[in-house]
Amino acid sequence: MKGKHALITGVTGQDGAYLAKFLLNKGYSVHGVIARRGTDTLWRLRELSVLNDIEIIDADLIDLSSLIRALERTSAEEIYNLAAQSFVATSWDQPILTAEVTAVGALRMLEAIRIVNPSARFYQASTSEMFGKVQRPVQDEQTPFYPRSPYAVSKLFAHWSTVNYRESFKLHASSGILFNHESPFRGIEFVTRKVTDAVARIHCGQQKELRLGNIDAQRDWGFAGDYVEAMWSMLQQPEPDDYVVATGTTTSVREMCRIAFAYVGLNSEDYVIVDPRFYRPAEVDFLTGNPAKAKARLGWTPKTSLESLIHLMVEADLARVNQVH
């Protein structure tokens, strides 16, 4: 194991930061791709105390030549493609950018691997959003896809490109169809973090209400720190494949709010306001994953309950709010 090189796109995101820490603990040399588009994108790596232990590489999923150079420079045996325009709501406002980065970006990385090192192992971050308007009550690897946003459509293109390169060029290319996974490092625009941040601010007297869209939407929520272990396990298998990674338990946004507010002794119904402005043009109402294949083949099971996860996130946001004020 020692001496393996891994390349992570999206290393500054929630999953990328947790994965970097996980791989470093296993003795990997970790190289992280950063597209220079944001302000301070390194804060998660800093908070997890891994920033100084990884090599940062300037490259971008919309630039094939930069991906080729990154692969040549790192001699990476494992490539984890976690980068994306990943906020569903933004994908309706920026559908073409979403397609360029999330869809064609994955294809560019697959092509770069085929050119530079076809023996490298590739992980594609697929998503439960591809199931969209669900065709079965519980979704597994055989459930038909029905994407309901430009983001989900783009992820589906990337997913099928991964399957195609696996079958066409015999790449060890696997996709993790990850259901919603959260942590204290979740972006503030995502509903779980929007809720826990609001709970902290309301508790500290800095905010009076929380406006949300469809609070009856139901999701299968897990802890991102658990899910990165499944990503790694896929690339350790003799043969590549696709896996659903989920808890198998579904909770509504309404119930998630109740858990978060109750942790600080508040009643969510006193503060949550349903605002039609936050409804999506096409809603995904219900997602529940069946992780049986991941359990059987990877030996993977989620370790963190939703209640423990939400409490962890509220604690982190309380600390942040108190630090700033």
Image: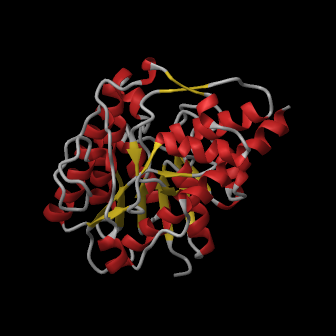
Residue 102 placement (x, y as % from top left): 35, 40
Q: Residue at x 45, y 65 (%)?
A: 75
Residue 137 placement (x, y as % from top left): 24, 54
Nearest to the observer: residue 228 or residue 173: 228
Up the image or down, 305 lies above or below 91; here it is: below
Q: Residue at x 55, y 62 (%)?
A: 305
Look at the image and tell me whether residue 309 can be seen: yes
Up the image or down, 294 lies above or below 316; here it is: below
Position of the C terminus by quadrant: top right
Nearest to the observer: residue 121 or residue 136: 136
Query: How many marks overall?
Result: 0
Look at the image and tell me whether residue 42 can be seen: no
> Is 7 positioned to the left or the right of 270 in the image?
left
Residue 135 placement (x, y as % from top left): 17, 49
Nearest to the observer: residue 270 or residue 38: 270
Q: Residue at x 44, y 18 (%)?
A: 277
Q: In which quarter of the image is residue 209?
A: top right
Up the image or down, 248 lies above or below 136; here it is: below
